Amino acid sequence: MCSIAGSKNPDRVGKMLDIMKHRAPDGSQYNYSPNFTIGMGRLAIIDLESPDLFPIVDGKYTLSFNGEIFNYLELKKELEDLGHDFRTKSDSEVLLKAYQEWGTGMFDKLNGMFAFAIHDGESILLARDLAGEKPLYFCEDPFEFASEAKALKRNDWKELSAGGCLQYDIARKTITTFHWWQLEEVEIKNPEEELEILFEDAIKIRTRSDVPYGLYYSGGVDSSLIAAFHNFEHKFTYKDGNYKKEFENVFEKIVWHLDYPIQHFSAFGLWKLAEETRSKGVKVILSGEGADELFGGYIRYLPEALYEQAQNKFPSYKTMFPVVERLHRKRWREFRGNLQELLRMADRMSSAFGIETRCPFLDKRIVNFAFSLPMKYIIDGFDTKVILKRILKKRNPDWQDFEKTGLYVSVNKWFGVTDPYDKTQYITRQKEICKKFR
């Protein structure tokens, strides 16, 4: 959970890194260049010994990097076979060498979560991971970028889209954007067996860490499945209670960290989880984010899914079951929409305590796999996350399913909203809450 920043003005870079120091408790530095300065703050996770890792410089190239390249050991071996030498044990150096060897072709090989900038003396390349786990914002004139919008201290910032790239020509002051990743349909022959293999490896490479790691564990399908593949020493569970006073004390801090508004109060639950995690000395956490969008976990998916199934079962009566939006399309829309807010919230709450969050369901192999699955493995009747539950029951026969509730935080109850569906009461209380924190 590092921070990255860049500007022609080195003083601006230093100020941006200072604003984001919560993301990077292990120090920050910048590499000055007459035409552009790149900086990086570090949360040390991989390679705690090598010097000069933030930013990392190799010849004319400077890399500022937030995230993890989970398959860096495999890529390092491939690059060594091609003649590259390494002076560190970090994934950062592997990423930079991969760019030197393959250019933007390296994206086909990367398996990770990342937001990074590479300065080659003439241009700046910005890139972001396919799901949007790591944040990245930029301004066009003058060109600047940072991990968090608040660090830019401008109103004209834009967010680089998930799976996106931006190339800035320093001399011409021109920007070109493109997407390095597109969803791919894969051939699936034995769904459960193949997903089990993919998921086991996704967790294996996400538990590579030189610092203690743990799991956000709710007991639901997603976290239970992760726990079924790996024995975690540290597990953290949010238990709802009457936290009204604490909520009042930290509300402004949460809003500051979030950068801009969200639709619900789950951020407080994530804040509490991150606070506990850090107090136990854990710096890396695995989370089940993405599973609902990929494998049909939301109850709101049922109407369209049931009508689709009815159309397939009773084709002669197709008109009786009007489908407003196909399940595949709805999942994809929320993967690109709703999930972005959830990932932003998870990133900001964990970064507030200097913690890195990793999401095995968002492994690019699993994303392609999920969107290639037939519906019967996603939703079958009223049963959601069909394939995940089958694998979970196989791995943990004692696991019991229960109604999905998500990360519930009873803020409404704390502030006297007895019926959140009573619009008048709800709006009145929201105004009072906002007035209190104004």
Image (spheres, rainbow, N blue to C red):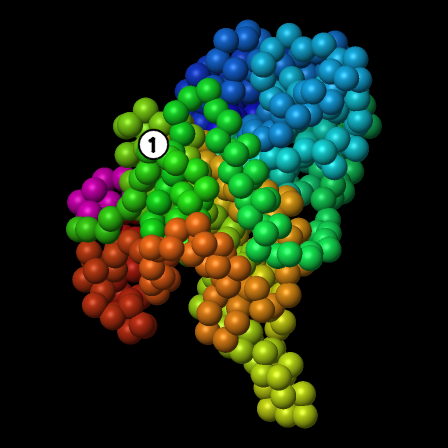
Is residue 245 part of the magenta span, yes or no?
A: yes
| Callout 1 amino acid | Glu
* Left or right: 190 in relation to 438: right
Task: Specify whether residue 11 is in view.
Answer: no
Outermost residue, right direction? 172
Q: Residue at x 74, y 37 (%)?
A: 108
Vertical placement of residue 12 versus 160, above or below: above
Image coordinates of residue 160 in percent, x first then y, are 64, 41
- Of 394 and 159, the residue lying toward us: 394
- The quarter of the displayed image where residue 24 is located: top left
- The quarter of the displayed image where residue 235 is located: top left
Image coordinates of residue 127 in percent, x first then y, are 67, 34
10 Å crowding of disc 1: few (<14), some (14-19), many (20+): few
- The quarter of the displayed image where residue 322 is located: bottom right
Task: Specify whether residue 415 is in view.
Answer: yes
Q: Which residues make up the magenta segment? A: 243-252
Q: Residue at x 24, y 45 (%)?
A: 247
Image coordinates of residue 308 in percent, x first then y, are 60, 78
- SS for callout 1: loop
Marks counted in the figure total 1
Image coordinates of residue 203 in percent, x first then y, are 51, 38
Q: Residue at x 32, y 29 (%)?
A: 278
Secondary structure mostly seen in magenta is helix
* Left or right: 148 in relation to 219: right
Q: Identify residue for label 1.
A: 233
Vertical placement of residue 143 versus 266, above or below: above
Is residue 247 part of the magenta span, yes or no?
A: yes
Vertical placement of residue 255 versus 38, above or below: below
